Amino acid sequence: MKDRPASCLDAFEVDAISVDEARQIITNEITPISASETVPVREGLKRYLATDIISPINVPPHTNSAMDGYALAGSDLPTTTPVDYKVSGASFAGVPSTESYQSGTVVRIMTGGVMPTGTDTVIPQELVETLDDNTIRLEAEHKAGQNVRHPGEDLAQGKKIFDKGRKLSAADIGILASLGFGEIDVLIRPKVAFFSTGDELRSIGEALKEGEIYDSNRYTLFAMLKNLDAKIIDLGVIPDTEKDIQDAFKKAAEESDIFISTGGVSVGEADYIKPTLKLLGETHFWKLAMKPGRPLTYGTVHHNNVSAKFFGLPGNPVAVMVTFLQFVQPAINYLASGKQQKPIFLKATSEENIKKRPGRTEYIRGVFEQTPDGGFSVKRTGKQGSGILMSMSLANCFIHFDADSSGVNQGDTVEILPFEGVV
Ligand code: AMP
Ligand code: MG
């Protein structure tokens, strides 16, 4: 590797690695978390299961009715002409019938009511003619076995319901409750630290002097980390000096599993990020064939017998978001779950010509919408400079171009990556 900072001026460096290689290196270097903790099931949302879940019971536990109506033995159903039946009892949800079922009669039953022994069929009340309080008439149109839910039909006892490493959704929380779990074992959350570098950065509340800007990267990073349910450690704005950067690296390595810096990795910086990584650990890669986000650094930092993975993100706010979503987020999820995220690409028709130089993967900010034929169309969100955060704010997807692509014409098909929660 050439020990030279990446620059926006040189087009395609030979030592810039591909996006796919970078993803591979990132996961190869990470050992997923195996430590677990027990939490109440309600606290389990978005957490990763530490064990497989085997169903301890049948859900539903009893044969029960799927409708409000009348239960009877299917063999008693009328075959040619209507038949009248005496109503011989009632079974409500949670209050089973106390009388034993007499063949030739029917039992009034409600949805979820336990099927009396000897019955196997429920006729919905809308299909029944009521003759008086105690007598109903059935036509010869019904099939035996209808409208009954069987034990274990939803979840069978002894069956594996969820795999270890599953991220729990709201439905999953409901399923765990229906199995009677009050607590579950989940993997502990990864600790993720971050800091901004740059002498031009001021914190919110401070007055801006000439040439100064507010630090926005720590806010977008915080918001993106919130989505991931990580333990978030904000280390603030670090001045561009060798000592301050080294101290920040040491503190972050001690306190976190993964830490992230923004800024200080492109040409013209007081560039202490790369030398500090070299001094305190190893560099796995530092330059990617992608846009935006080329000077992305990945390494391992050691301090006081502990180590952490490090991502040195560029300073430009859009590059921060793109590199976080494409590399840091999958890395955190892999650390947290041992599972690799597979991005979902959709095909869309480009509403415009988009020029691109071959040689690097590009993530252009786009807005896609559904077309009347059920497909999708997409266009760019105006200016695409990597400092223009509005291009992300207005977007609901990335338009993804492979490294060897040279762009598309209006009407051509492109690949889009919808943002999380958009579809
Ligand atoms: P750098 O990579 O440090 O050269 O930063 C590239 C560009 O991003 C510069 O215009 C910086 O002012 C800007 N920038 C760097 N860090 C931040 C930040 N935390 N918030 C907003 N803009 C930033
Ligand atoms: Mg800087």
Image: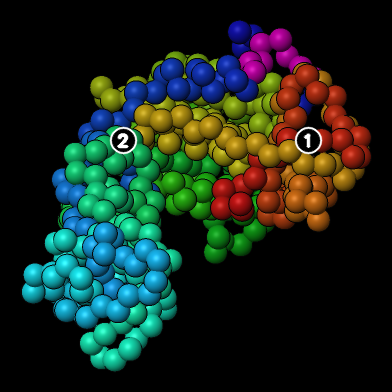
Q: Is residue 21 above or below residue 266?
A: above
**316 with respect to 57 (left or right):** right
How is colour applied across the structure in the image?
rainbow
* Disc 1 element: strand
Q: Nearer the viewer, residue 297 or 196?
A: 297
Q: Position of residue 231 (x, y in %)?
A: 35, 46
Q: Nearer the viewer, residue 129 or 174?
A: 129
| Mark 1 → mark 2, Cα distance in angstroms | 35 Å
Type of amino acid at the residue the image marks with label 2: Asp
Which labelled disc corresponds to residue 163?
2
**354 with respect to 246 (left or right):** right
Badge 2: residue crowd in 10 Å (few <14, some 14–19, many ≥20):
some
Residue 36 lies in what quarter of the image?
A: top left
Q: Is residue 397 above or below residue 146?
A: above
Question: Looking at the image, do the residues carrying marks 1 and 2 touch, with CB atoms under 8 Å apart?
Answer: no
Task: Name the residue beneath numbered marker 1.
Answer: 414
The residue shown at (85%, 29%) is 407
Residue 101 lies in what quarter of the image?
A: bottom left
The residue shown at (25%, 91%) is 133
Q: Residue furthest bottom?
A: 132
Residue 148 lies in what quarter of the image?
A: bottom left
Type of amino acid at the residue the image marks with label 1: Val
Q: Which residues are magenta?
A: 11-18
Cβ of disc 2 within 8 Å of ligand 1?
no
Q: Nearer the viewer, residue 382 or 49?
A: 49
The residue shown at (55%, 60%) is 204
Q: Can residue 263 be seen from the camera position used here?
A: no
**345 with respect to 278 (left or right):** right
* Disc 2 element: loop
